[in-house]
Image (cartoon, rainbow, N blue to C red):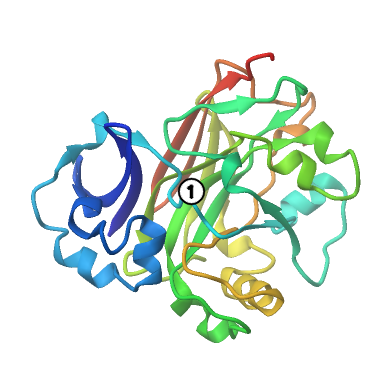
Amino acid sequence: MKLVSFVSGGRARYGVVSGDGVIDLAARFGERWPTLRDMLAADGLAEAARVADEAPDFQLADLEFAPVIPNPDKIVCVGLNYRDHVAETGRTETPNPALFARYAGSQVGHGQSLIKPAVSDEFDYEGELAVVIGKGGRHIAAADALGHVAGYACYNEGSVRDWQRHTSQYLAGKTFAGTGGFGPWLVTTDDIPDPAALTLETRLNGQVVQHSTTDLMITPVPEQIAYISTILPLLPGDVIVSGTPGGVGSKRKPPLWMRAGDVVEVEISHIGVLRNPVVAEAHV
């Protein structure tokens, strides 16, 4: 099942994708569960599945996509989680995952524009698998971790590299407004039972710039969930952005940056394609 957050008639909604259309879950369950995050928190996937064969209320082509979870409690990103990316950065593999945070305001949905900041010309792409938590918990064992996942989506963890290098902390370059693409939808775990069996590809203006498989993660998804949930409780709707493979623009010779007018795509097998144009931030 594919679940999508979107805007129609100026109103935020969510629904089930059915072919080229969307069944409006907000119209059916909105009084109980105003957002997709609320539905996940109430363990409402079974109810969503029961209406998944109804006639669509909207056509996908007519919608403005929102980030899959527009209002997560937290977005935790995993850095340096593929060996080829560790190698291209010249860093050393660490025994524990490198974590940093993004904020909800840094995200845009499928088809929306990524914003190249006015203060930087070093705007880089990072195609990644996003993991959306469905069942919260603390101290989750790795063996039980996939039972806490609602589903998966594509993520472009756009990074402003010169700001990322300002200090040893990544945050400054990792959460500029409008730099993270999240979409196009969440594919539930009944359709993706194994997140380590996926192919990930990033394309910039049609050129393949990253290609890998998720079984090459240094810290697999279950261990990520176990590690993060030891630090603080994971909540329904939380997002784990699980790391990018090698091929980032900053490590190419010459560097390859995203610029206004570009189109960047992140495609993951069994999920689909997250596509975002790039625009320049308006100067204040």
Front-most of residues 49 and 8: 8
> Where is residue 214 drawn, in percent x and y?
56, 59
| Vertical relation: 82 (above or below) 123 | below
For badge 1, the amino acid type reads Cys
Identify the residue shown where x is 59% and y is 86%.
141
> Where is residue 57 drawn, in percent x and y?
14, 43
Asked where in the image residue 165 lies, by quadrant, the reply is top right
Direction right: furthest residue: 167
Number of marks in the image?
1
Q: Which SS class for mark 1? A: strand
> Where is residue 28 drawn, in percent x and y?
18, 57
- What residue does disc 1 label? 154
Quadrant (top left/top right/bottom left/bottom right) for the C terminus: top right
> Where is residue 86 drawn, in percent x and y?
79, 53
Quadrant (top left/top right/bottom left/bottom right) for the N terminus: bottom left
Asked where in the image residue 157 lies, by quadrant, the reply is top right
Q: Does 72 sit left or right of 14 as displayed?
A: right
Asked where in the image residue 40 lies, by quadrant, the reply is bottom left
| Vertical relation: 129 (above or below) 247 | below
Direction left: furthest residue: 55
Identify the residue shown where x is 20% and y is 39%.
20
Q: Residues within 10 Å of mark 1 (few under 14, many from 20)?
A: many
| Vertical relation: 100 (above or below) 256 | below
